[in-house]
Image (spheres, rainbow, N blue to C red):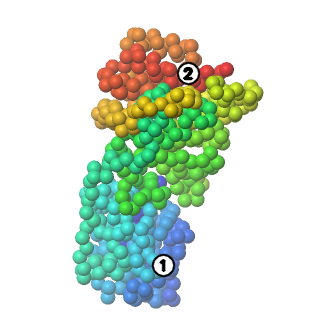
Amino acid sequence: MLSKVKSFGLKGIEGYPIDVETDVSNGLPHFEIVGLADTAIKEAKERVRSALRNSGFEYPAKRITINLAPADIKKEGALYDLAIAVAILSCNEKNNIKDEGKYVFIGELSFDGSVKQVRGVLPLLISARALGYKNFIIPLANKEEASFISGITAFGVKSLCEVVSFLSGQIELSPIDSCEFSTLANNNDYEGLDFANVKGQSIAKRALEIAAAGGHNLIMIGPPGSGKSMLAKCFPSILPDMTFEEALEVTKIHSIAGELDLKKGIVCSRPFRSPHHTASTVSLTGGGSNSKPGEISLADNGVLFLDEFPEYSRQTIETLRQPLEDGVITVARSNATITYPANFTLIASMNPCPCGHRGSREKECRCSASQIAKYLSKLSGPIMDRIDIHIEVDNVTYDQLRSQEQEESSQEIRKRVNKARAIQLERFKNSKNFCNAKMSVAQTKIYCTIDQKGEAMLRNAFEKLKLSARAHDRILKVARTIADLDDSKDIEARHIAEAISYRNLDRKLWND
């Protein structure tokens, strides 16, 4: 007999339909899976065979051939187990399976017939819904992910027996209840990391507030112990609330990577990723044999913190060029080319020299000119040009450290950031932008107009600092964010002046 059921596969963060075609015919007992299946799928025949027998179903002692169509696309993972098992059982009229063609089946099977969770359920459901599929049978463990997708009917199941009983009309299953994102949003998962605990560093705090409000990249340069890492770790506590669209995009990536908290089913706090400087290029960009997302994609709509920036390999640093400019990373491998979102805010920190004390008021630098040049040369001009805000962080004084004056809390700063981001969401409501940092050239011309005084100031900075066209545009974007924080409709000369002040540090250090 011949049967066909639906499943879905993943390529990057996009799903595509898979027809699980099954032929059970007379002949010597044999189980074959065709259709460019990887090892995990090839091994499905053992999982399916054991699941059928241990669930009390008759395993056909015949020739079984499974085709995963379209046959010219490589399939990966164990998410087709449930669809294969249902297709085999539907070939036996004794099982009385009906309407199996109405559902999309996703799930991995254990030997005892239980249905195990799989990665990537949320992007699969979103893609399937876009293609017109409405009914799904998925693992019960993935129900939280499905609860945030409107316009579908999904049933969470524990076992193969439950699926067959449902399809044969012996039992009824209740669809997974929908959940509102607002019930989980605005939860702050960064307890204990608060700017109220950071003494001094008012300039750095102001710069980080601007970076959070506009989604701007920032680098902190200063001696060891000045508080660069602490400032960066407090940065997520002032980030703006995520929109539902942002949360869905982040959840897609974390679901595929297997890092999703299944109890929540959605990522409701902005990611903060901090890979060690020994991290490989592939771990940062993504790829490998399974083309999984890397750290820069897992930081999408959140923060990528690179401490001791020059200590990363030159090749690794240079791979940041495309995502910093385009907000995506294209991973090209011999078996696939996949594009992942990488719309992150880069926060980097570094010492001004190998010993770390160049320009410090506390200690004298002992590095030679050649050592300093070699150290700074690890960061190319194009990389520094893509970082909007450059600030110098010096050591706090004893009086600042022991001061009893109450520092402004992250909660207060976050209120201003949310207000500025709300202005931007309204500004870009008809585009895919969420923040000023991602404005296109055309949008920059529309929303970053300046008066004559500001024009003269920007021209002077452009010529004296020998700025690039990219740096010019980024100054305007930062100025736009500063104006939003001031609740100013127009960019004023003082906004331009402050934005310029965040662009001259790389010229100072790299041109000494």
In the image, 160 versus 26, the foreground residue is 160
Residue 47: assigned label: 1
Q: Residue at x 32, y 85 (%)?
A: 95
| Rendering coords of residue 468 (x, y %) | 55, 22
Q: Is residue 162 left or right of residue 377?
A: left
Q: Is residue 349 left or right of residue 370?
A: left
Gap between marks 1 and 2 measured at Cα: 62 Å
What numbered label is drawn on residue 504? Answer: 2
In-front residue for pair 496/449:
496
Mark 1: secondary structure: helix
Q: Amino acid at mark 1?
A: Arg
- Is 449 rendered above or below residue 62? above
Q: Measured from the top left, where is residue 371 in percent x and y? A: 74, 31
Q: Say which quadrant the N terminus sits in.
A: bottom left
User: What's the residue type where badge 2 is placed?
Assistant: Asn
Label 2 packing within 10 angstroms: few (<14), some (14-19), many (20+): some
Q: Is residue 395 left or right of residue 512?
A: left
- Of labels 1 and 2, the one closer to you: 2
Image quadrant in which you'd find residue 175: bottom left
Q: Is residue 235 above or below residue 281?
A: above
Front residue of 238 and 300: 238
Residue 494 spot, x, y in % from top left: 41, 16
